[in-house]
Image (cartoon, grey):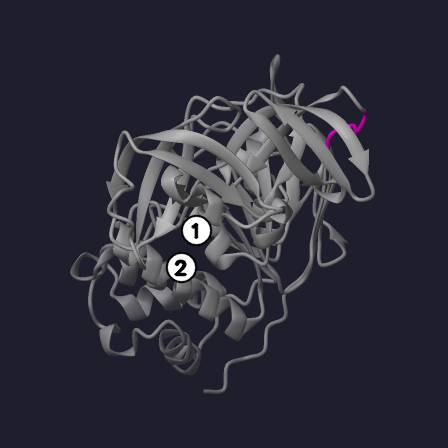
Amino acid sequence: MTQQPTTGGDVRLTGISKTYGSFTAVHPLDLHIPAGSFFALLGASGCGKTTTLRMIAGLEDPTTGTVLLAGQDVTALPPYKRPVNTVFQSYALFPHLDVYENVAFGLRRRGVKSVKKQVEEMLELVQLGDFARRKPQQLSGGQQQRVAVARALINHPRVLLLDEPLGALDLKLRRQMQLELKRIQTEVGITFVHVTHDQEEAMTMADTVAVMNGGRVEQQGAPAELYENPATTFVANFLGTSNLIEAEISDKSGGALVLTTAGGKLALPAARCSAPVRTGGKVLVGVRPEKISLTHAEDADTVADGRNRITGRIADSSFIGVSTQYVVKTPDCPEIAVYEQNIERDPRLVPGAEVVLHWNPAHTFGLDAAQDIDAGTERDEEAA
């Protein structure tokens, strides 16, 4: 395959904002998306992610700020003069044209005479070479999505914008397409900016994720960094599931904090606490459900020293194949979620059983207790 080399351009937003009358959709925002990266804007409905994408595309005029694409100030340029293409959730394929002509449309519109080689290469890239003469209605949702990507990429944009492109697909197909889009992005090297409300989708595909909430970026970084070290309760709750426990800092020795909870003591590495650290100060202690192990109370003496531990009673359990998900009532928190892989299941771990929850203190994180402990828990499954 002799794909014409196309390099991605970086995207730099400086002081960009958008207001509609008295409503602020996007508060002044500075954002740099490196050239050639796969970048995701993640958030619930109404958080401003799609408005931000549309300002990059030129489909919305910013109220303040500038948009630079590949070093060029495009703030005042119309969409067709920007080095970008957009793939929408609806795909917007031409029903009367076959796959070949849908992909060739952009080239023909620009007056390119010989399109055969480029179209065939693009269809090969998206693995649709055998479907060139089919109409869109003869394709599955995932195939239509790949046609839309091919039609956008054939114009060799510096940046490809994806607005909830997988939202209309069923779960299994969506997961397949996540890997497919990542493969395509890696092959062509174009900068992808992807808007989604799906946490798994963002973490699967993106090099960098910006979590948006209320028109602001709450936190930005690599998926693993955001998941392991959330900076706010919104990020902790929105990106996966977190157990958050109210605690008081009772001591600080070396690099560790000793915390007092309703049920006892917990240890927290000081470096993993984003809250102000002072003796007597309040924090929210966080731990992910899959980091916690469950041991029946009869075997409490087998739990290794040095681990954080909480006692409780199993309120509910759900077998979901790869793991069993437990809800445990404790003095520290009304409900703590625990996910245990189904390797060697203890038959005693059933609702009503007294248990010890324990985990490595290094897997604990600390957040400012002044924040809303429930922020990010009510996820909106609609696209913004």
Q: Is 321 on the left or on the right of 190, as rendered?
A: left
Mark 1–mark 2 Cα distance, whole angstroms, equals: 7 Å
Q: Position of residue 382 (x, y in %)?
A: 37, 33
Q: Quickly name the residue at label 2.
A: 178
Does label 1 or label 2 sit earlier along the sequence? 2
Please report contact status of discs 1 and 2: CB closer than 8 Å, yes or no: yes
Q: Looking at the image, which residue is at 33% across and 62% down?
A: 176
Whether 263 is among the magenta residues is no
Of residues 116 and 329, the one nearer the viewer is 329
The residue range painted magenta reads: 274-278
Q: Quickly name the residue at label 1.
A: 201
Residue 294, visible in the rendered structure: yes
Residue type pointed to by label 2: Gln
Q: Looking at the image, which residue is at 44% across and 78% down?
A: 118
Q: What residue occupies the far bottom of the structure in this picture? A: 1
Q: Residues within 10 Å of mark 2 (few under 14, many from 20)?
A: some
